[in-house]
């Protein structure tokens, strides 16, 4: 329920070459072994035959270490391949969710969820492939200081047997994650005005959709940066107010096919990405809408963002329980740069 979840949350709480014992690192550090720049060799099942690709994988911590971002770039006989994976840790369950996107359409797939045990990470999700419901498993294994392996497999019989379809072998190039300096592929510049660090003032409606006129205020910092060669960006929000501390991560992905953006949110308390709200910019203002459950009602949620110029920007959230005929604004943000 993404943004609604955050509103409720704030009201309620405000050895080289040797195997690395991943489980000993603690859940929040399970993927620390992956940080760096890696050479990758990929075998990918296409129909009944395997194709091979070679490329680079860059993984770095984001959101103050509460998440990691993996960017993959590879080439093979069928052309160029790019993917991005956002790893989010859920402190409540001790599990990770892996959120995958391909540069072909800039949309998020079904999150794969799981954890590490005895140096092996297993992650599962359920997808529809060619009209059939399929279990998908991703396994991270053979982890050393300079190498590791990832295998994805599908099961068509409820997990009794597994058919591998994607195998990646990774070898360390550098412990330092490299950062792309030039945009790759189709890039939108709609959010360029938002890049950088901003001082943020927030006003929140205490009880939306109740004819309430009671608001409370928060202050904080938001930092927005381009990732994945400019095909996406991350906004990291930290704020404090009368109901405690708030931390939010927003992943914004550009879809080159629809020319739209999707925005998915996560809070540090939940550590999972929301279903995205989708929209586009017109006349310098971005408007994004999705459908959510709030209490016992299904409502529309709208998020807007834009620049005021001169080192100032704004955003707001609104709810509608009449199909978009009327909107009640319940969250107003003003941003300023020093």
Image (cartoon, rainbow, N blue to C red):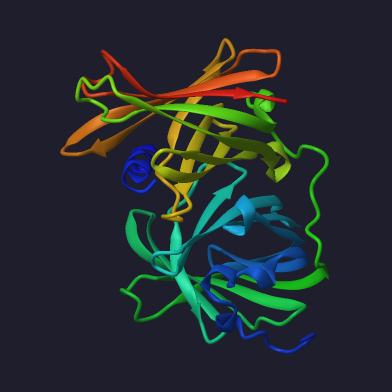
Seen from this angle, which residue lies furthest front? 242
Left or right: where does residue 177 sit relative to residue 192? right
Q: Residue at x 69, y 38 (%)?
A: 226
Quarter of the image for the C terminus: give it: top right
Residue 315 x/y as whole percent = 50, 23
Residue 318 x/y as whole percent = 36, 23
In-front residue for pair 105/252: 252
Q: How many marks are shown on the rendered structure? A: 0
Against 141, residue 85 (above or below) is above
Q: From where the camera sits, is residue 187 visible?
A: no
In-front residue for pair 187/324: 324
Seen from this angle, which residue lies furthest left? 296
Q: Residue at x 59, y 14 (%)?
A: 284
Against 63, residue 135 (above or below) is below
- Quadrant assignment, res 77: bottom right
Q: Residue at x 56, y 36 (%)?
A: 220
Left or right: where does residue 82 sit relative to residue 163? right
Residue 297 x/y as whole percent = 18, 34
Quarter of the image for the N terminus: give it: top left
Q: Residue at x 59, y 55 (%)?
A: 85
Q: From where the camera sits, is residue 243 visible?
A: yes
């Amino acid at each position: 329920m993404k943004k609604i979840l955050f509103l409720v949350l704030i009201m309620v709480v405000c050895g080289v070459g040797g195997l690395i014992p991943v489980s000993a690192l603690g859940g929040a550090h399970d993927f620390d072994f992956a940080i760096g720049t890696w050479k990758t060799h990929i075998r990918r099942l296409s129909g009944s035959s395997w194709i091979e690709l070679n490329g680079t994988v860059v993984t770095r911590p984001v959101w103050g270490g509460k998440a990691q971002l993996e960017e993959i770039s590879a080439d093979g006989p069928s052309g160029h391949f790019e993917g991005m994976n956002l790893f989010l840790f859920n402190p409540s369950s001790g599990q990770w969710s892996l959120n995958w996107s391909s540069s072909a359409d800039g949309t998020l797939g079904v999150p794969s969820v799981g954890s590490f045990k005895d140096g092996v990470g297993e992650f599962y999700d359920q997808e529809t492939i060619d009209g059939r419901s399929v279990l998908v498993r991703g396994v991270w294994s053979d982890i050393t200081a300079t190498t590791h392996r990832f295998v994805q497999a599908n099961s068509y019989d409820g997990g009794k047997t597994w058919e591998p379809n994607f195998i990646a072998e990774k070898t360390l190039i550098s412990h330092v994650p490299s950062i792309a300096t030039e945009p790759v592929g189709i890039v939108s510049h709609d959010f360029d005005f938002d890049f950088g660090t901003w001082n943020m003032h927030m006003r929140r409606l205490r009880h939306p959709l109740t004819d309430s006129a009671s608001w409370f205020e928060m202050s904080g910092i938001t930092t927005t940066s381009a990732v994945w060669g400019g095909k996406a960006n991350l906004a990291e929000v930290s704020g404090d107010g009368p109901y405690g501390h708030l931390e939010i991560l927003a992943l914004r992905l550009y879809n080159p096919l629809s020319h739209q953006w999707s925005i998915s949110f996560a809070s540090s308390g939940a550590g999972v990405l929301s279903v995205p709200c989708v929209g586009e910019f017109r006349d310098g203002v971005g408007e994004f809408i999705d459908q959510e459950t709030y209490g016992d009602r299904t409502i529309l949620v709208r998020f807007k963002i834009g620049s005021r110029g001169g080192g100032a920007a704004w955003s707001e959230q609104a709810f509608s329980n009449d199909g978009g005929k009327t909107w009640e604004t319940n969250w107003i943000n003003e941003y300023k740069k020093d």
